[in-house]
Each structure stands twice: as structure tokens, then as C-alpha cells.
Amino acid sequence: MEFVCNLPTKIYFGDQLVLLGKELEKYGKKALFVYGGGSIKASGLYDRVTGLARGAGIELFELSGIEPNPRIESVRLGAKMCKEHGIDVVLAVGGGSVLDAAKYMAAGAKVGFDPWLFLSEHAPIEEALPVVTVLTLAATGSEMDGGGVITNLQTHEKLGRMEDILRPKASFLDPALTFSVSAFQTAAGSADILSHIMETYFTTEPDLYMLDGIMETLMKTVIKYAPVAMKKPDDYEARANLMWASSWAINGFITGAKPQAWSVHPMEHELSAFYDITHGLGLAILTPRWLEYCRNEKTLPRISRFGENVFGLAPSGDLEKDADAAIKALSDFLFGDLGLTSTLGGLGIGREHFAQMAQKAVKGGVVEGFIPLAAADVEKIFEMCL
């Protein structure tokens, strides 16, 4: 079981933003400051960040308005600004969308071609400007991984990629900065964290006992603390647990030697590309139906174990019943405890693009996940979500 574990991002966890200037000045004197809407101004975070950066002698060039499903147009603009102003470091303040866009701006600054080619043609990413992040939403894990997902609405594509060179050099994770996150975004972000773990956890391949146990504990952490954070947004313990679980769900540690492809994320990316829905919500709608579709003699033991070790369900001795109970417990959590919309129909989405979306999700082949999924299988899962 050979694998490589490389987690080079320096994490400042808790109330340590005062060290931001010192971290930025390691990389130069000019920073591209990337953020989303006006929430960081309303909260006072904008003033704190700009004050700390300028206090360290950093010249800031701002790019705001990064979209919830970040657009390639924003990436192109950021890469252009980096080149025009001789940017030394990209400072991303926000949630996963801002961080993802910043990573591809940092890579785009080093090449002479359209950064969309990084995703559409898998053009090599050999260099990138350093990225420093200040996280305001626990969800995607982008603060500690080399991944990023970018949307091209013109081509109805939402594509992602993982490269170690895109990992942030340093990330500031202060749970207090997530106190203002709405109940809906907390729920959707928690569904995203769960999905990152489940895409890795649900495998028929043997893995390290230790990693299985860690994944189960991470999922139990989300199940315990997401409802708390929704009801009491300023509960520091709940926000801290969700924030740290988010980072470890996708930084590469739990992957171990498992070679399988993810299944639910490619399906959801098509939903977001066509309908621009919240990523975590799409994952929540898809995941229980995907598990139901994957039920077979080979997968039943794993689904049953999930119910027992994550939701505390007592095994009955009948794997089929236990698997059904596990899937129901997951659905009850996502659509009951978290209050997320349970169907695509509830979002006004019909079946008109399902065949096209399914073909794009499998890229004309088969997704080798928990079970192999061809386009016809993906289309059936979409139908189950109506």
C-alpha cells in the first residue's frame, strides 16, 4: 500500500490573524487581495485584513465579487491583474469559491495561455504564485488542499483539479469568523464536508483500519456539531470542530492508498454547471440516492458499517435491512436535521438535461467509484432525485 502524504500548508488556528502581515511579507511586497461580496466589510474583517497587510508594508490590489460557483472570467481577470501589477502573493479571504479562484489566478499568472486550459485540457501547472488564505466558511477544505473547481457557464462546464503546487502556503482558520454564516450555508457546507469523506470512505477495497476509524469520527463530528452551529451560530466549539473537520476531510490524509475515483462530485458539478445551485445542497440531494443505487452484495457490508459506526445503529444481522437503515439515517440527517431541500424537483429542476449531464459527468466513459457508473447509471440517479 504505497502512498505519498504531503501536507505542507501552515495552519494558524484560532485568533491569530494578527500574524497575517508577517506571513505575507515572506513572499514579497505586492498582494492581490481576492474576496467575494460585501460580507467581509460588514463584519469588519475587510478593515482588519487591509490594516494588517498595509501595516507590514504590503501594497494591496483588490479583486472583489468572486461568485459562489467561481467563474473562469474572474480567474482570467485575477491572472491578468497579477501580471500587470507584478503581484508577489495572492491573499484570498472568504469561503471555498474565493480560495479556488485565487489558486487558478496564481497559476494563471505564470503562463501565457488561457487559465481555462488548466481544467479543460489539463495543461501543466508547473508554477504558481504563493497563496495565503483567511477562511470564513467551513465547507470545501480548499484552505489545506491543492484543489479548485471553476465554472464556465458558456460551455456548461464545472471542472476541478488537484495539484500540490496549488496548496496554500498558509491559512488562517479562526472559527469566530464563521459565526455570521447563515443556517442554510452552514447546512450546505456540512453536507459538503460529509461528501468529501464519504467519497473516500465508500470503497470495496481494503484500507488501513486507522483511516477508516478517522473517517468515521470526522463524519460523527459533522453530524454532532452542524445542528448545534445552525441553532447557535456563535457556538465556538461547534464552529471549531466543523472548521477543522473540513480541512481534514480533503487535505489528502484520509485517502491513503485508495485509488478509486469520486462519483457524486462529478454528478453535482453538472447540476451546478447547468443550474448554478449551491454545491453542498446538490451533494446532499444526490448522495443518499447514489448509495441506494450502489447497493449490491459487495457494497452492503460497507453501507451497513456506516450506519453502525457513524449513526450508532444496532446491527440486525440482515445486511440489506441494515443498509436501508443507514441510508435512511443519512437522509433524515440531511433533510431533517439540516433542513436541506430533498429533491431536484423542489429546486425547480426537471429531467430535460439529464442525458447530456450524465454524459458529461462520466466524460464519455465510466466513473470507477463505489461501483462503476456509466452515463445510463448516472441518468438513473438523477431521476431518483426528482
Image (tube, helix red, strand yellow):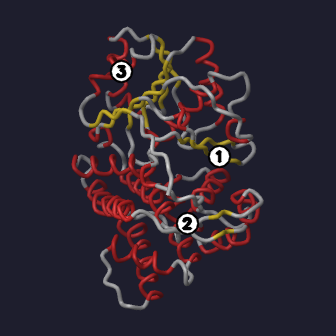
| CA separation in Å, label 3 and label 2 | 40 Å
Instruction: Name the residue nearer the viewer: 4 or 335.
Output: 4
| CA separation in Å, label 1 and label 3 | 31 Å
Expressed as whole percent of the image width and height from the top left, the position of residue 242 reads 32, 51
Residue drawn 74% across and 42% down? 154
Q: Which residue is mark 2?
A: 286
Secondary structure found at label 1? strand
Is residue 173 shown left or right of residue 380?
left
Is residue 12 shown left or right of residue 328?
left
Residue drawn 48% across and 68% down? 206
Residue drawn 57% across and 57% down? 265
Kindly identify the amino acid type of the residue bearing the numbered disc 3.
Glu
Secondary structure found at label 2? helix
- For the view shown, which residue lies furthest in the front direction? 2
Kindly identify the amino acid type of the residue bearing the numbered disc 2.
Leu
State which quadrant residue 215 falls in: bottom left
Secondary structure found at label 3? helix
Q: Residues within 10 Å of mark 3 (few under 14, many from 20)?
A: some
Q: Are marks 1 and 3 in contact (CB under 8 Å)?
A: no
Q: Are marks 1 and 2 in contact (CB under 8 Å)?
A: no
| CA separation in Å, label 1 and label 2 | 18 Å
Task: Tell which tag, 1 or 2, sits nearer the viewer.
Answer: 1
How many marks on residues? 3
Expressed as whole percent of the image width and height from the top left, the position of residue 112 reads 72, 21
Task: Tell which tag, 1 or 3, sits nearer the viewer.
Answer: 3
Q: Which residue is mark 3?
A: 23
Q: Which residue is mark 1?
A: 159
